[in-house]
Each structure stands twice: as C-alpha cells, then as structure tokens.
Image: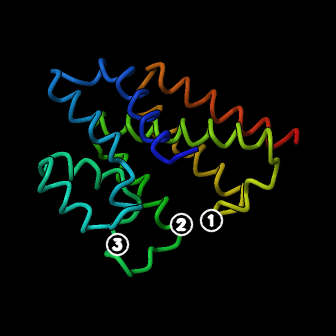
Amino acid sequence: SPFMSHLFSVCAMVCENIDFICKDAEEAEDYAITAILHDAIEDQGGMEAYGRISRDLGTQIADNVLMLSDSSCQPGESKPPKTERNRLYREKLKQAPPGIVLISCCDKIHNMRSMAADYLVLGDEIWKSYTLPPEQTLANYQTLEEIYKERLGSHRIVLLYREALHAVECLRQTL
C-alpha cells in the first residue's frame, strides 16, 4: 500500500486517543501534524527536512518530528546501526512529552498490524525486508511496550499496543 496510508493511519489513531494528553485544540492539532510528518526527518532528508518543517510549520512541530526520528543524518551520511538507533530512540521516549510517546505508540501499533497482515500472506519471508532478525525486532517492540506502559499508564492505547504485539508474536510461533 502507498506509504501515505501509514502516515494517515498513525494520525487517525493519534487523533482518536489524544484527548487525555492535550490541554487545548491547538496542541492536539500540532500533534496531529506531527503524526503526519513523523517519518519525514528519518526517511526524507534528515536535518534538511527538519529545516523545511521548521520554516513551513514552526520549530515546535519540527522539534516534535525530530524527537520521533531514530536518525537525523544529513543526505549522504550513513545511519548508525539499527540496534544503536533503537536504543537511542527508546532513551528519547523516556524523556519525551506524552504526546510524542502517544505518536510513537500509534506508529508502532500500525507497523505491527501491517506486519501481522503481511505475515498471513508471506510468513517468515517478511523478515527479508527488516534490518534486524525477528528475535531482535520483537525484543525491541517488547522493550518499547514497557516504556509505553510506564509513560502512558493504563490508557487504552497501551492495550492496543499489547494486542498488536501479541498478534505478531503468535503468528511468528504458529507459521
């Protein structure tokens, strides 16, 4: 499916769950815009993308997107190894505002739902498109779950995360 479907799905999930975090509609709107752009720095130009977002939408939204990026390399620079990017991303989440943690959680839920859907068709072949082996990928998702529980408490989004992770874990064991 087109990549935009991921961005719209994450944004929709954020909008459906933002009410417990935001104090006003403007803050909720900023988080919705951030959700749409959450992969821009990481996947579409590094700090050049940050500059464009900052210029066009303001520093706050650009800073939000940067917090959600596992890499902020300049075009042509090599990204650090995925395990290091995952570790640094998790560390950022421990300090990030709740709205950023919510966006991250929604992003990972959609990623895992897509993974589960692909698993039904491709089985273990899906792992060919991942940087890390399945055990490390799932271990990262499991560690993120603990961060989301700690940061977002008993909000329903944490339960949706658990459900998505459980689906992938079960499919991995049965196929």
Q: Residue 33's spot in the image, x, y percent?
A: 26, 38
Secondary structure, mark 3, is loop
| First reached walking from the N terminus: tag 1 or tag 2 | 2
Amino acid tagged 1: Thr
> Is residue 26 shown left or right of residue 64?
left
Secondary structure, mark 2, is helix
> Is residue 14 shown left or right of residue 61?
right
Would you identify the image quadrant in which residue 12 lies? Answer: top left
Amino acid tagged 2: Lys
Amino acid tagged 3: Cys
| First reached walking from the N terminus: tag 1 or tag 3 | 3
Write the residue at 47% across / 25% down: 157
Mark 1 vs 2: CB contact within 8 A: yes
Residue behind mark 3 = 73
> Is residue 88 shown left or right of residue 145?
left
User: Marks 3/2: CA distance?
Assistant: 13 Å
Write the residue at 41% across / 56% down: 89
Specify the quadrant that holds the C terminus.
Answer: top right
In the image shown, does 59 or 7 lie closer to the viewer? 7
Would you identify the image quadrant in which residue 50 lies? Answer: bottom left
Say few, some or many: other residues with alpha carbon within 10 Å of mark 2 (under 14 / 14 to 19 / 20 or more): some
> Is residue 27 shown left or right of residue 18?
left
The tag on residue 82 is 2
Write the residue at 23% across / 27% down: 28
